[in-house]
Amino acid sequence: GRASAPLAALSQVLRLERSRRTGIVFPLQKLERYLAPGTDTARFRLFQPGLAALQRAEALFRSDRGHPIDYVSSAVRMDHAPPPALPEVCFIGRSNVGKSSLIRALFSLAPDVEVKVSKTPGHTKKMNFFKVGKYFTLVDMPGYGYRAPQDFVEMVEAYLQERRNLKRTFLLIDGVVGLQKTDNIAVEMLEEFGIPYVMVLTKIDRASRGVLLKNVLEIQEFVKENTQGCFPQLFVVSSVEFSGVHLLRCFVAHVTGNLPAVEAS
């Protein structure tokens, strides 16, 4: 298996000086100081777990002999999907949004898990299922937009409508370019089906601070004005620097029912 990245584990992050540590674990809070006075930042802190919750969540993403984390199977149709036995989360987004890279970062403490990361947009043509011990399943969905498979809509619509154990959908948005028309189609689908979801802004290490702030505020306003089923807090992540990855692990643990009480810090 490959070695885990330098900041993949919380213990490594906790060795950093305080402001850098906050920037890795709570990257939205790092952005707060650059906002105009009086800007409402309540939505930056709706999900703010303490250290104990972050550590419990990390343990779920760390594989060992008694807690295997495995790729289970791929499916192009719902009748090929594994039985819906465990709570499930799925990750969807435009092709080339960094979905596989983010899933690989989430699973970086389980180095034997093989998450294929393609340099070719639209490479993921199937739903890929990963089982996290006896706790939950994570599903990597095909990318939409550029070179998306013809049957993408049918596949994803069927999954979203039929998967009774689906607890939360994670809709990934490129942090450099912000919300695109194709993302709005995904939002409309999730809203129409009444699926609870959350937006995740990826690749934040590639966006300038100004661009990132603009995209964060625009998406928060969009969520407030145009959505019913979207969690009001946006998550921002970098799969390269591990910013936001620890918090996202914690949110996944929380929505799958594996973190009964998330205490505020």
Image (tube, rainbow, N blue to C red):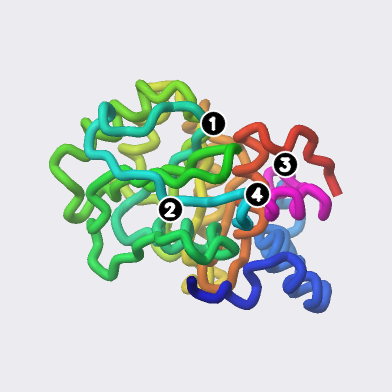
| Residue 195 percent across, percent down from the top left | 46, 26
SS of the residue under disc 4: helix
Residue 55 sits inside the magenta stretch: yes
Mark found first going from the N terminus, 2 or 3: 3
Q: Label 2, on which residue?
A: 173
Give residue 46's mark. Answer: 3
Horizontal side of residue 73 vs 170, given as left or right: left
Residue 258 sits inside the magenta stretch: no
Mark found first going from the N terminus, 2 or 1: 1
Disc 1 marks a residue whose amino acid type is Pro
Mark found first going from the N terminus, 1 or 3: 3
Work out how far the residue at label 2 is from the one at label 3, CA to CA, in angstroms. 20 Å
Do the residues bearing badges 1 and 4 touch, measured as CB atoms within 8 Å? no
The residue shown at (41%, 61%) is 114
200 w.r.t. 27: above or below: above
Horizontal side of residue 179 vs 247, given as left or right: left
Mark found first going from the N terminus, 3 or 4: 3
Work out how far the residue at label 3 is from the one at label 4, CA to CA, in angstroms. 22 Å
Q: Label 1, on which residue?
A: 87
Work out how far the residue at label 2 is from the one at label 1, CA to CA, in angstroms. 24 Å
| Residue 215 percent across, percent down from the top left | 50, 57
Do the residues bearing badges 3 and 4 touch, measured as CB atoms within 8 Å? no
Residue at the far right: name it. 265
Crowding near the residue tagged with mark 1, few <14, some 14–19, many ≥20 C-alpha atoms within 10 Å: some
Disc number lying in front (3 or 4): 4
State which region is magenta.
41-59
Work out how far the residue at label 1 is from the one at label 3, CA to CA, in angstroms. 23 Å
Q: Label 4, on which residue?
A: 60
Disc 3 marks a residue whose amino acid type is Leu
| Residue 92 percent across, percent down from the top left | 38, 45
